[in-house]
Image (spheres, helix red, strand yellow):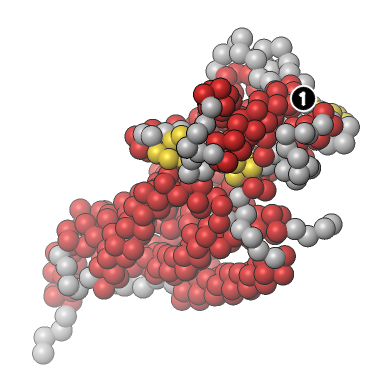
Amino acid sequence: MELNVVDLSRLQFAMTALYHFLFVPLTLGLSILLATMETVYVMTGREIWKRMVKFWGTLFGINFVLGVATGLTMEFQFGMNWAYFSQYVGDVFGAPLAIEGLMAFFLEATFVGLFFFGWDRLSRRGHLFATWMVAIGTNFSALWILIANGWMQHPVGAVFNPDTMRMEVSSFFDVLFNPVAQAKFVHTVSAGYVTAAMFMLGISAWYMLKGRHVAIAKRSMAIASAFGFASALSVVVLGDESGYEANLNQKMKLATIEAMWDTEKAPASFNLIALPDMEARENVFAIEVPYVMGLIATRSLDTVIPGIKDLVEQSKGRIRDGIIAWEALQQIRANPNDVPADVRTAFDQNFESLGYAYLLKPFTDDIAGATDEQIDTAAWSTVPEVLPMFYAFRIMVACGMFFILITTVFFYYSSTGKLDELQENRRWLLHVAVWSIPLPWIACEMGWFVAEYGRQPWIIESMLPTSAAVSDLSVTEVLLTLAGFVALYSTLLVVEIALMLKFIKIGPDDGTPEDLLPTAKAQSTRAVAMPAE
């Protein structure tokens, strides 16, 4: 396969993003769990909950630091590898990324320091406030990143200025409350909660299998199963909302997820299993469930979901409209002070399809003179590879169903006081929990693959193709930075895993039996038991 700057730049950003998101979901979820456990400690005064917060807080701290380290370089890649993209969206991206920086480096960093070093310097309520601020800051930091990402999926609240060749904000309110961004935020955060819950559940199960730190393990398992069960259910509900938004705004993504080549009569069927063939442009075989897809994606019985082939035909029409806009744009740029009225009118009537004209650039240097064959090729380039999209989505969904099942089981045992039965007679369930620890990360990475790969060939949906957004770099330069990033991030991942395993093996401080009592009673018990001098 011939190497090119576009594919290598995409690969580099994909690798750094996927590495970074190995750390993000655990940070999002653990921050809420820590705040919840410390709230129980402040309300009850039981020292065991404080020890739980300190233990899980250590693992949170390791993950938080490495998450920050891997996230720093991502924003610099916009200027390094995606120079035209940065110029094109600078007005839109500036505010969300600046606010995210304030959240991450002022709010989060300040209160993280207070969380770790303020146990003996702050009152209980003061430290609890710091912990909740860490949780709030961490989650709202993610909000601003996802607002920027959501705008790339569904660009609203901004207009293209042909004189500056930039997108300019027309309504920051629309950017902020973009329905795609909001759906992505709640879905992503809920997935992070599931990740943290499964992480805590699996480690607690490991301690129970080993017969170590059982008191802390049982309490951690109880809170993780309850939190995980609620979060897993919300992921499914909020994922359905994301699918509904995709049907409204990213129809090609939805069609490739479902390997739906031809438009069906409403309500469309759901392909449970299929073998898509990109060359033949059909499914070799498929097991269909009638009506399900139409009901899920449109929430109606009579709304048609267009298939891939019809969407390609629509793209051909938009490419031809885009050529008109492109020709008008060249005249506007050639003489911006004296633009004929008919040229400006032609641009205004077709500018929403301008991005489609740029799809022709990989196939011809003469956009205005593109042939029907070149237009057809460009239109089919709007279809991502169907097979990986189809199965990545189903892996994610299968994991989600499993998380609901396993958290339900452990919530039942913890809420009915039967965790001892697990340790004695259902040890296989504990083994399942341990071996399930990696699954949330797999589900999260599959989700991001579907979201980002499914948007291709667009870096900004229907407006700017990825091929038009890269910097003027050589293949060698991108290869060197790609290798450097992979080496650095792999090292950081090994460091993360090694540190996590080290502190998990050390385990929490079990304290004394009196730690199960409220603080005042525990101190009184210790005073009675203390021998006279």
Task: Tell which residue pokes out farthest to the top in this image.
Answer: 302
Q: Position of residue 67 (x, y in %)?
A: 47, 64
Q: In the image, what residue type sits under mark 1?
A: Lys
Q: In the figure, is residue 325 to the left or right of 50?
A: right
Which residue is at a point 78% across and 42% down the rendered structure image? 364
How many badges with numbers are in the image?
1
Residues 186 and 78: in front is 78
Q: Quadrant of the C terminus?
A: bottom left
Q: In the figure, is residue 49 to the left or right of 391?
A: left
Q: Position of residue 127 (x, y in %)?
A: 21, 63
Q: Is residue 314 above or below residue 338?
A: above
| Label 1 element class | helix
Query: Tag 1: Cα neighbours inside 10 Å, few (<14), some, or many (≥20)?
Result: many
Residues 248 and 84: in front is 84
Q: Which residue is mark 1?
A: 309
Res. 455 image quadrant: top right
Which residue is at a point 59% across and 35% down the rendered structure image? 331
Q: Is residue 473 above or below residue 400?
A: below
Which residue is at a point 17% across and 68% down the rendered structure image? 122
Which residue is at a point 36% across and 58% down the rendered structure image? 101
Q: Position of residue 45 (x, y in %)?
A: 20, 59
Q: In the figure, is residue 458 to the left or right of 25?
A: right
Res. 105 image quadrant: bottom left
Residues 529 and 309: in front is 309
Q: Quadrant of the N terminus?
A: bottom right
Residues 195 and 149: in front is 149
Q: In the figure, is residue 311 to the left or right of 83?
A: right
| Residue 405 in view in this figure | no
Q: Position of residue 306 (x, y in %)?
A: 68, 20
Task: Tell which residue pokes out farthest to the bottom in this image.
Answer: 533
| Residue 171 in view in this figure | yes
